[in-house]
Amino acid sequence: MLADAATPAIPNRRRWLVFSLRSLFVLMLLIGVLATVLVQSWQTTQLRREYLNHAGAINGHPRTMQGYSFRATRRTLGGLLFGDGRVTEIWLYPGSYDEAYLRRMRELFPEAVIADYKSE
């Protein structure tokens, strides 16, 4: 049956569900990038917490860290979403670390001042 010119066209209510292949690709790309950023932020937060929990451990680990100064949250994605705190200072025992260890600490805690512990 052909539509008459006198009969009005029925509006298509499902038109908003129609996507082009290009817009679907862009949407999936944005979701993938967002998921990648979130996972990397979560992994960095976990590495930072693991270091703070185990660096001063005595059971089977060399004791490298004397202590650290900590603030509530960082103004980063990890700080806002995962509760990652801001470490302001880290005190290490002299001679308990090498240059590679210090470099890794600076990658994990770029905001912290890392210094040798000096007992007074």
Image (cartoon, helix red, strand yellow):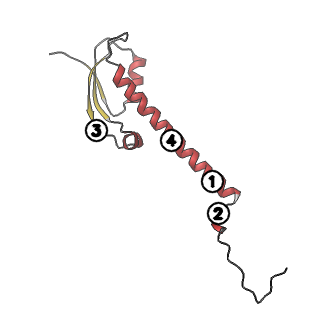
The three-letter code of the residue at mark 4 reads Val
Marks 3 and 4, Cα distance to the nearest angstrom? Answer: 22 Å
* Left or right: 10, with 3 as reference point: left
Q: Which residue is mark 2?
A: 17
Asked which secondary structure carries label 3, the reply is: loop
| Residue occupying the point 28% across, 38% down | 72
Marks 2 and 4, Cα distance to the nearest angstrom? Answer: 28 Å
Look at the picture and state if 56 lies above or below 24: above
Q: Earlier in the sequence, mark 3 or mark 1?
A: 1
Depth check, mark 3 against mark 2: the one in front is 2
The three-letter code of the residue at mark 1 reads Val
Depth check, mark 2 against mark 4: the one in front is 2
Q: Which residue is mark 4?
A: 37
The three-letter code of the residue at mark 3 reads Ala
In the rendering, at what x and y percent does residue 116 appear? 27, 19
Whether pointer 1 and pointer 2 mark residues with C-beta atoms closer than 8 Å, the reply is: no
Look at the picture and state if 2 lies above or below 70: below
Q: Which residue is mark 1?
A: 26
Q: Residue furthest right?
A: 1
